[in-house]
């Protein structure tokens, strides 16, 4: 199936740990994104990569480090996890173009104990 | 900075009836795009409908249509013949236009829609 897929879907871990979330898209898109959805359901952009180049970095703590090995993959690594990092993280992709919509993955629910 | 406001945290509609969800936005740009996304309990983010700001005609997708008022910066979503499967959070989103523009989406705070029998 063509899609944006994220792994894992659920991640439960303790404060202070380091974790990664992976994202892959097989839609042939050249731009990928990470969004964070907090407990009040508010969605906010974190990062965006276009053809492996970082183009958006929205005042995110440097404990968060995205990595794009190729334009089909955008991973998110988080160091020294804090309670406030608990959220749902969505990966999305789109094709550069004036009105191309973003396609979202199913989200990764990160819970910090 | 662009902002998107959804003033209705919750709405309810009876099955088969029509409901309108409100969205207003603030921007100084003339070239932009507007979207409605649906997020059911399954957590997926599903694109419902999109509108290009340069188009005067309101977008329509089956039972979903928008009322785009550019001067008023308003972009409401109308759902006709509501179905139980329409129950979800609905997010209005804005994206700047222009070639080479970093295309992040700015979301509203969402409206939770309940559909009753």
Image (cartoon, coloured by chain):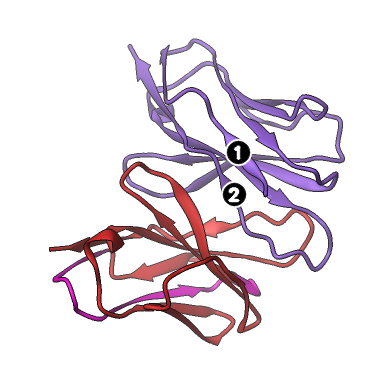
Q: Which residues are magenta?
A: A10-31
Whether residue A100 is visible: yes
In the picture shown, does residue A112 fall above or below B115? below
Q: Residue at coordinates 61% horizontally, 84% vertically from top-left?
A: A52
Can I make out residue A28 in this image? no
A49 relative to A61 in the view: left or right: right
In the figure, is residue A94 to the left or right of B68?
Answer: left
Density class for disc 2 (Cα within 10 Å; few <14, some 14-19, many ≥20) is many
Which residue sits at x=44%, y=28%?
A: B86
**Residue A10 occupies quadrant:** bottom left
Residue, x 41% and y 49% (percent of image)? B44
Residue B117 drawn at (x, y percent): 33, 11
Tint applied to chain B in the drawing? purple
Q: Are marks 1 and 2 on the same chain?
A: yes
Magenta span has B35?
Answer: no
Residue linked to disc 2? B106
Based on the picture, tell me whether residue A12 belongs to the magenta stretch: yes
Residue B106 in percent (x, y) is at 59, 49
| Residue B73 quadrant | top right
Q: Return the x and y of residue B26 as percentages of the image width and height.
A: 70, 37
Say which residue appears at 77% left-offset and 47% top-offset: B32
N-terminal of the pair, mark 1 or mark 2, is: 1
Q: Colour of chain A?
A: red
């Amino acid at each position: 199936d063509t899609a944006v897929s994220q792994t894992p879907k659920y991640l439960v871990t303790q404060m202070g740990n380091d974790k990664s979330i992976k994202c892959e898209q097989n839609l042939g898109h050249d731009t990928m994104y990470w969004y964070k959805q907090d407990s009040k359901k508010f969605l906010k952009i974190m990062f965006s990569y276009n053809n492996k180049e970082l183009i958006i970095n929205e005042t995110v703590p440097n404990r968060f480090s995205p990595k794009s090995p190729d334009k089909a993959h955008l991973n998110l690594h988080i160091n020294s996890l804090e309670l406030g990092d608990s959220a749902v993280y969505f990966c999305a992709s789109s094709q550069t173009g004036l009105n191309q919509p973003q396609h979202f993955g199913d989200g990764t629910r990160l819970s910090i104990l | 900075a662009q902002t998107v406001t959804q003033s209705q945290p919750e709405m309810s509609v009876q099955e088969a009836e029509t409901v309108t969800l409100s969205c207003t936005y603030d921007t100084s740009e003339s070239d932009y795009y507007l979207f409605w996304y649906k997020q059911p309990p399954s957590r997926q983010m599903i694109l419902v409908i999109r509108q290009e700001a340069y188009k005067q005609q309101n977008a329509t997708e089956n039972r979903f249509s928008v009322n785009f008022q550019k001067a008023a910066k308003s972009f409401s979503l109308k759902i006709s013949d509501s179905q139980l499967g329409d129950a979800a959070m609905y997010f209005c989103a804005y994206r700047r236009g222009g070639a080479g523009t970093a295309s992040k989406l700015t979301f509203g705070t969402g409206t939770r829609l309940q559909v009753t029998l």
